[in-house]
Image (cartoon, helix red, strand yellow):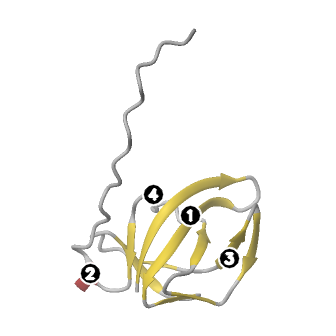
Amino acid sequence: MLAHVFKVRNDLYQGRVSMLRVHQGALAVGSQLFIGDVRKPFKVAHLYRVQGAALSEIPRAVAGDLCAVTKVEELHLDAVVHGSHDQDHYHPRTTPQPQPSAVPLA
């Protein structure tokens, strides 16, 4: 299992909501996952499908799905989440951002 955190937000009722895209394998409730090269795993207690501001609980997400997990404080933007230590060396490529133009405002 390999996933990438593309957005993190704080919700009033859910707490910290981390949105993931699953790139490989499947993510299920009860899975033990690792963040980057950190040795301590975390367990997925709840898995959600995000539709606007609403979160609906799902039992499993497969490759290509966008999903969310809640209340995992260690997750941060651009974190790589994986199922085994064989994938510790995977890191997302940074997306180049355009520089702001220096156009004076009239």
- CB atoms of marks 1 and 4 within 8 Å: no
Query: Could you say where residue 18 lies in the image, as x and y percent from the top left?
Result: 56, 64
Q: Is residue 81 left or right of residue 8?
A: left
Query: Could you say where residue 65 lies in the image, as x and y percent from the top left?
Result: 56, 80
Q: Amino acid at mark 2?
A: Gln
Dot 4, how many residues are within 10 Å of its Cα: few (below 14), some (14-19), or many (20+)? some
Residue at image mark 4: 76
Query: Could you say where residue 48 lies in the image, as x and y percent from the top left?
Result: 67, 76
Residue at image mark 3: 49
Numbered circle sitting on residue 87 = 2
Q: CA distance from mark 4 to mark 2?
A: 18 Å
Query: Could you say where residue 43 lies in the image, as x and y percent from the top left?
Result: 50, 80
Q: Secondary structure at mark 2?
A: helix
Q: Secondary structure at mark 1?
A: strand
Q: Is residue 72 above or below residue 12?
A: below
Q: Looking at the image, is mark 4 or mark 3 nearer the viewer? A: 3
Q: CA distance from mark 1 to mark 4?
A: 8 Å
Q: Is residue 94 above or below residue 37?
A: above
Q: Amino acid at mark 3?
A: Arg
Numbered circle sitting on residue 18 = 1
Q: Amino acid at mark 4?
A: His
Of residues 17 and 99, the one drawn nearer to the viewer in this rendering? 99
Q: Amino acid at mark 1?
A: Ser
Identify the image quadrant of residue 56: bottom right
Q: Looking at the image, is mark 1 or mark 3 nearer the viewer? A: 3
Of the two numbered discs 1 and 4 on the same chain, state the one appearing first in sequence: 1
Identify the image quadrant of residue 55: bottom right
